[in-house]
Image (cartoon, rainbow, N blue to C red):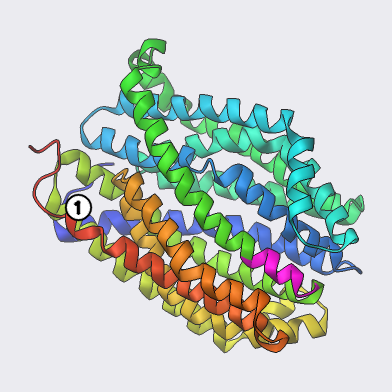
Amino acid sequence: MAADSEPRSLLRSFLRQAGPNILANVAVPLAGLIDAAMLGHLDALHHLAGVALATIVFDYLLWTFGFLRMGTTGLAAQAIGRGEPGEALCVAVRAALLGVCVGALLLALREPIAAIAFDLLEGTPDVKAAALDYYRARLWGAPVTLVNYALLGWLLGRQRSELVLALSVVGAGVNVGLDYLLIYRLGLASAGAGYATALSQACVLIVGLALVSPALARLRGQLSWRRIVDSAGVRALLGLGRDLAVRTFALLTAFAVFTDFSAALGTATLASNTLLLRVFGLAAFVIDGHAFACEALAGLMRGRGDQAGLRAVLRIGLYAGVGTGLAFAAALLAFPGVVFGLLTDHVELVEQTAASAPWLAPVLAVGAAAFILDGYFIGLAAGRTLSRAMLAALALGFAPLALWARFVAPPALASDGLWAAMTCFMLARVVTLGLGVPATLRGPSPRAR
């Protein structure tokens, strides 16, 4: 599906992709929210808190390699823009092979990783025990999850957001069904949640390969081992991957420190902030539906050498993303008790979470612009810009306030201080990325020259 760079046509193309992307993205955190709700309704809170703690580890282990999705989208979209669908497929195969190798290595090192990770994280003994149960169960799905990153990146780069939606529905549906079976019926608690996630990823890969088999058959003649291991293509993926890994590592560090510092403030604060982050994650995934459309179209316009189209993509993305963030924040602030009451039946936890809910308004409003700018630069495969901007935002926007909240602030202000740090982090991302935009819009792209 090619996109015309005329403003109206480009807007229609953006909306055609953003709609399925939003629905696909919502399926992921909705499964996480249902997961949290099932754990939150168990008699003890340490299962929910333990999964939150283990999620920090998985964020590092898996999303550090998120470039397998993001890098594939940008490079594949640019190849499509140049009229090279075979090269777009080669990009995905390279990423998938790398994902298999990384996933196998994570499994081989699972116990040393656990020993180091959970020794560094704060939490009570029962919380850490629940976290280890979840970690050991979910890690079996690591190789499949990383291959799925490459598959989804290729589909997004080809503007096949409807297939991404189908796979997200499959993954979320299987995850929720297995959550009920393993957590409630079999009583596996946090371990059951981990197994459910791992098995759902395997189902996504099986269904995904079936859905793309016609496209693979058409492009088979353009795929060869020599082309897959082409040194220029491998260097492009690894170079972009290095920068995106740094960017993702810095992003995850902010959320990991936020969660770990929350744990230091007590199990109740950790559980409360976990629920807030789950809701924030839902909103972020909705906004990311626009960011993914921005990735694909920015890459396509860069591949064509169309600077006017590139400028229009960024403008459309910012309007759509920020508007969605503001609407989501307004709806959440209007009904905080209802939302959090669905996630847990612990009345005190609902009250504590609702009291902190207003912080989601500035985080979402500013964060929406950051997500769109992220998507724009991912589409351009501008890894260096992304890594430098995220490191600066972590050091200058997040760290000072977070450290103050953890070590200096009075207990009554500590949790608010953490949310203030997250707000400043999002603002710093907007500023640092925004400074890089003008250079991308000056003159023709390299291909056009």
x and y, in percent, of residue 298 in the image: 26, 49
The three-letter code of the residue at mark 1 reads Thr
User: Residue shown at 74%/76% (left/top)?
Assistant: 269
Give 378 or 416, whichever is nearer the viewer: 416
- The answer to which image quadrant residue 341 occupies is bottom right
Give 147 or 120, whichever is nearer the viewer: 120
| 267 in the magenta segment | no
User: Residue shown at 10%/38% (left/top)?
Assistant: 448
Write down the residue under mark 1.
440
User: Residue shown at 72%/75% (left/top)?
Assistant: 272
x and y, in percent, of residue 387 in the image: 40, 50
Q: How many marks?
A: 1
Q: Give the range drawn in magenta.
A: 258-266
x and y, in percent, of residue 25 in the image: 52, 56
| 262 in the magenta segment | yes
Majority SS type along the magenta span:
helix
User: Residue shown at 77%/46% (left/top)?
Assistant: 135
The answer to whether residue 155 of the structure is visible from this angle is no
Mark 1 secondary-structure assignment: helix
Give 178 or 276, whichever is nearer the viewer: 276
- The answer to which image quadrant residue 241 occupies is top left
Quarter the C terminus occupies = top left
Residue 101 vertical position relative to residue 352 in the rendered view, above or below: above
Q: Tell whether 296 sits left or right of 109.
A: left
Q: Tell whether 366 sits left or right of 42.
A: left
Quarter the N terminus occupies = top left
Q: Tell whether 293 sits left or right of 439.
A: right
x and y, in percent, of residue 53 in the image: 74, 58
Q: Few, some or many C-alpha atoms within 10 Å of disc 1 (few <14, some 14-19, many ≥20)? A: some
The answer to whether residue 373 of the structure is visible from this angle is yes
- The answer to which image quadrant residue 137 occupies is top right
